[in-house]
Image: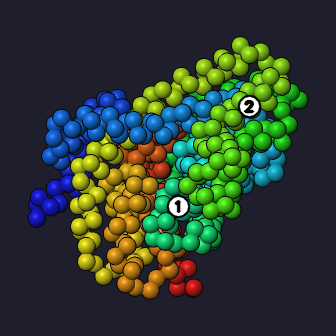
Amino acid sequence: MFGEIWPLISVVIGVLVLLVLIMLLKMNTFISLIVTSMFTGIILGMPIDKIVEVVEKGMGDTLGSIAIIFGLGSILGKLLSEGGGATRIADKLIEKFGEKYVTLAMIVASFIIGISLFLEVAFVLLIPLVFTLAKRMKISNLKVGLPMATSIAITHGFLPPHPGPVAISQALHANIGHVLMYGFIIGIPLAIIVGVIFPKFAYKIAPVAFTREGNQGTIADTQKIENKTLPSFGISLLTALSPVILMLLATVVQLITGHEDGKATGFEGFIYFIGSSTTAMLIAVLFAMYTMGIRRKHSMHQIMQTVSDAITPIAMLLLIIGGGGVFKQILIDGGVGDTISKMFHGTEMSPIILAWLAAAILRVALGSTTVAALSSVGIVLPLIQSVDVNISLVVLAIGAGSIFCSHVNDAGFWMFKEYFGLTIKETFLTWTLLESILSVLGLGFILLVNVII
């Protein structure tokens, strides 16, 4: 029995070791993650010669998918900030919503942007706007940032075309259109309720976190830009949303043609090419160099200096996120997912609750939202084949479970911590608690919808 649950015990030991290294010994987070990953691999019984291979794979797979996007996103944010575009958008939001409703403004803007962008891309794209809004309105970064995080977490876990919901839908043979429809029905009220209430609750339990200035290395001193020289709201919004527009265009074409794998030739293939996250971000950066630089009479030297200034602050952040990916890969290759799958074998639990629970446990153990979602399909699939249940709601239940309790083995945890300049404890009390509340309330909404329909 002890041997059967040892992988889960190893996860707990690994997390405790990581917390000791960072919080007690004050070791650099990236080094702590690598040390912990190797130690966890050893106690999981992985062959010594394989551990380094898995470490390299975890780092490569994680950074390989987001390093380019992170870099381009940081450059886009810096160009928007230096060129006054972020200030113009912030001013317009303040004018339309006022300080009293700034939370609602961020919920709406982030939900729209988050629909077609991966969580990491949306986060990088929105963070300059968060800091700019907070600075202009003289309020805490977290007061603006938590509503933003709420919306992009919901879109990442609940809505196609995000990889988790799409992959689960395909594996369970669910109608993606139905999943999207139910996702909106559940996700919109969830974003408004949690996005409005949670920041007030978080302030009561972690007030010091709301005083942090965060990593504002990619944000310009916008007070130096006179209002009359700012770019127009339209061109600023178009620049900020250009990658979203390109990705959304490719998504719409995929849904119309049925080529949801994004493989095609000719004009359709070209649309998929410019709509891929990397290409879309590159085009957006080139567009921003014109609208926020050349169009505003900035020299190429000034523009390239802005580009260089945008990259420097994110170097350590990228390493930390890669380190989180290493820890995740060690847990996956160490057999943690297989252990959890065996635990649920033969259960007669409600498919919706089982789907959520399986994804939630895998999420806590493995870290990755998408990996947790996909791994839980194998647990749920045998059960739903023998019972009458709404498959679309099962997909959403898995999605809800897959965002539960983000912690030290999740790249999103470190991203939130580093950008907002929080301690680990403060990140647990804000980001981790936020995602857990979204996950549990999301399950409640799903069960409610299941009763109604």
The foreground one among 326 and 22 is 326
Q: Residues within 10 Å of mark 1 (few under 14, many from 20)?
A: many
Q: Secondary structure at mark 1?
A: helix
State the quadrant of the C terminus: bottom right
Task: State which quadrant residue 386 falls in.
Answer: bottom left
Mark 2 vs mark 1, foreground winner is 1
Q: Which residue is mark 1?
A: 166
Residue 232 image offset from top left, x and y in percent: 85, 37
- The quadrant holding residue 408 is top left
Q: Residues within 10 Å of mark 2 (few under 14, many from 20)?
A: many
Q: Is residue 172 left or right of residue 386?
A: right
Is residue 82 or residue 259 the one in the foreground? 259
Report helix, strand or loop for mark 2.
helix
Residue 5's place in the image compared with 143, above or below, is: below
Q: What kind of colouring is applied to the model shown?
A: rainbow
Q: Position of residue 405 (x, y in %)?
A: 40, 56
Quadrant where the image shows the N terminus: bottom left
Give the image location of residue 147, x and y in percent: 61, 53
Residue at image coords 82%, 38%: 235
Q: Residue at x 44, y 66 (%)?
A: 171
Kind of residue sitting beneath label 2: Ala
Q: Residue at x 42, y 40 (%)?
A: 62
Task: Name the residue carrying label 2.
Answer: 288
Q: Is residue 47 above or below residue 288?
A: below
Sequence order check, earlier mark of 2 and 1: 1
Residue 201, relative to residue 303: is it above or below?
below
> In 3D space, how far apart are the residues under numbered discs 2 and 1 (Cα atoms)?
31 Å
Q: Is residue 260 visible?
A: yes
Is 281 positioned to the left or the right of 9 in the image? right
Tell me if I can see residue 24 in this picture.
Answer: no
Furthest residue to the right? 228
Amino acid type, mark 1? Val
